[in-house]
Amino acid sequence: MRHVSLLLLAVAACDDPGATPDAGVDAGVDALVGQGSEPVGDLVINEVAPRGAGSDWVELTNVGAAPLDLCGYFLTDAADHLDHFLPLGGVMPPAPCPPLLLDPGGYRVIQLDNTPIPTAGPIDPLHAPFTIDAADQLHLVTTAGAIADGLLYLYPRGPAEPADVSLARVPDHAGLFFAVAPTPGAANPQELP
């Protein structure tokens, strides 16, 4: 169902000849249009790289003023059904989770490389059991089931083009997502070039 929704979104965007181009696509005289929405919580998706050399990856950041415990969150590529999810604390609830803190302004890069979740033993919170596509979604979900942040996106590069951009919040930590040079584990640009 998720793929059908994404396909309908992509088709709808292509059917309207007067539609504004996506971020990173040649916009002619129009300014680039950002994707997603401004963050509202302290833990946010800050950058997404669905293609490129190596595995897909996502960068999370703590925009709050205090360290944030990742034990209370999952990363998933489908908020409506958690068949692909990664417990960010490295422990499957309801098992106790030792605190795994992300400092204020800190970054955490997670490889989206289809690493299976083990049936026993520790879970590597830096490798997710799913990958993402050029048109997909990512969500941060609390262990209570609330969506903390999310992004439904269309990656601006076609299959034959080089994957030399990521989708990143501009300005770093706060803005919408734009196609820029990748900065995994470091600050995104504060403004568009």
Image: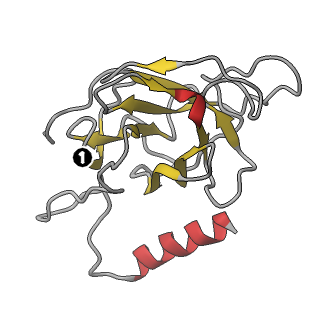
Residue 151, horizontal then vertical, whole percent: 45, 53
Q: Quadrant of residue 115?
A: top right
User: Can see residue 134?
Assistant: no
User: Can see residue 133?
Assistant: yes
Furthest-right residue in view?
Answer: 119
Secondary structure found at label 1:
loop
Q: Quadrant of residue 80?
A: bottom right
Q: Is residue 54 positioned above or below 94 on the image? A: above
Residue 117, horizontal then vertical, whole percent: 78, 30
Query: Is 45 in front, or is 6?
Result: 45
Q: Is residue 189 positioned above or below 144 on the image? A: above
Disc 1: which residue: 175
Q: Is residue 7 left or right of residue 9?
A: right
User: Which residue is drawn at the image coordinates 64% and 40% (left, top)?
Assistant: 131
User: Which residue is drawn at the image coordinates 50% and 72% (left, top)?
Assistant: 9
Quarter that holds the N terminus:
bottom right
Q: Quadrant of residue 121?
A: top right
Query: Is 6 in front, or is 127?
Result: 127
Q: Is residue 4 positioned above or below 115 on the image? A: below
**Mark 1: amino acid:** Gly
Quarter that holds the C terminus:
top left
Residue 171, horizontal then vertical, whole percent: 20, 39
